[in-house]
Amino acid sequence: MTTFMTLFQRISLLAFVVVLLYGYSLLPEVVGFRFNDFQQPIEAFHKGQFFYVTAGFVVLFNLLIVLFVQFVAQIPVRRLAIASFWTQDKAHVQATFQILRGWANGLAGWVNALFCWFVYQFVHHNTVTYLNLDPTPYVIVGAVVLTAWMIALPLRFAVKRI
């Protein structure tokens, strides 16, 4: 599962980069996120700002996930709960760290995919200005998926494996 989640994270990051670069080439020089009745942007900024802020945020997030995975691998076993099933022997400890690594990579993959979708919708909204974009359903679906993914980790460790 860890290999699949690592692959999912890398593919979603690659998809984000492709969508961001493709969107950057399509965007007008001034992009807006609120439009008036005449389809003129009310609040606007330069497309370079959009590109660098979005890319910087995603790079920072992925860097934090990579650092988290590195630090999780260095947690001493004595700091884990002593009576825990997951710390019985060296094989269980390795399995615990593999699960945590897979979960972190999966979280990063979902967030990258969500940002890829948001960038795509933002670019589409700025290139086809007559479309009235309501991002609420996408935000709700994204929040539900991320919440389910975050709840999956404690549930995974709550069940005693045989």
Image (spheres, rainbow, N blue to C red):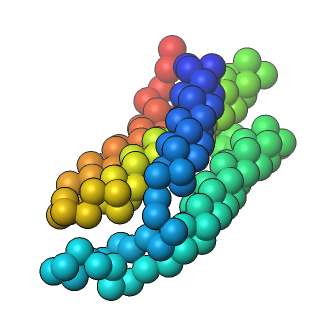
Q: Is residue 45 above or below residue 58?
A: below
- Give percent across and percent down for residue 135: 25, 60
Q: Residue furthest top?
A: 162
Q: Is residue 141 above or below residue 83?
A: below
Q: Tell how many labels.
A: 0
Residue positioned 59% across, 43% down in the render: 17
Residue positioned 27% across, 57% down in the render: 128
Does the rendering let one see residue 76? yes
Camera-side residue: 63 or 103?
A: 63
Q: Using residue 77 as the reference point, say whether residue 106 is left or right of it.
A: left
Residue positioned 46% across, 59% down in the render: 27
Does the rendering let one see residue 57? no
Q: Residue furthest bottom?
A: 42
Residue positioned 46% across, 46% down in the render: 116
- Give percent across and percent down for residue 137: 20, 55
Q: Quadrant of residue 40?
A: bottom left
> Dividing the image into 4 quarters, which one contains the N terminus?
top right
Q: Is residue 55 above or below residue 77?
A: below
- Give percent across and percent down for residue 151: 40, 45
Camera-side residue: 134 or 69?
A: 134
- Give percent across and percent down for residue 119: 44, 53
Q: Is residue 88 above or below residue 81?
A: above
Q: Using residue 39 as the reference point, say whether residue 50 is left or right of it.
A: right
Camera-side residue: 101 or 14?
A: 14
